[in-house]
Amino acid sequence: MKFVLSSTQGTHGFSIQRTNINVPVSTGAPSQKVLWTPSTKGTYTIVCSIYCGAGHSSMVSTLTVS
């Protein structure tokens, strides 16, 4: 899997829980590319790992590897 990360407002963190992936993403910085080959099937939670203000707690997603 390949994730291409960028931010248009402030600093955020891209973290896939249960893995060692935790990448800061800042406005104006070059896009970050994350390559990941899951070794375990299941559901992974993706969160913003750097407090970024209002709406931070709603920056959550899930990824299903089957």
Image (spheres, grey):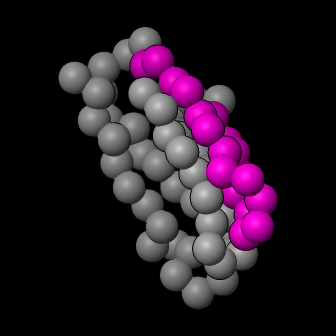
Q: Position of residue 55 (x, y in %)?
A: 52, 81
Task: Name the residue at the left extreme.
Answer: 66
Q: Position of residue 30 (x, y in %)?
A: 73, 53
Classify residue 39 by image quadrant: top left
Report how many numbered discs are placed on residues in the image.
0
Residue drawn at 43 percent across, 27 percent down: 1
Task: Name the residue at the bottom extreme.
Answer: 54
Residue 63 relative to residue 21: left or right: left
Residue drawn at 76 percent across, 67 percent down: 28
Residue drawn at 34 percent across, 48 percent down: 62
- Pick the residue in front: 21 or 32: 32
Q: Is residue 32 magenta?
A: yes
Task: Name the residue at the top extreme.
Answer: 39
Q: Position of residue 59 (x, y in %)?
A: 48, 67
Q: Range of the magenta residues?
A: 21-38
The C terminus - image quarter:
top left
31 above or below 11? above
55 above or below 27? below
- Pick the residue in front: 4 or 53: 4
3 above or below 49? above
Residue 50 relative to residue 17: left or right: right
Classify residue 23 by image quadrant: top right
Residue drawn at 66 percent across, 51 percent down: 31
- Pick the residue in front: 2 or 13: 2
Q: Position of residue 21 (x, y in %)?
A: 63, 35
Q: Is residue 48 magenta?
A: no
Any part of residue 49 in sight: no
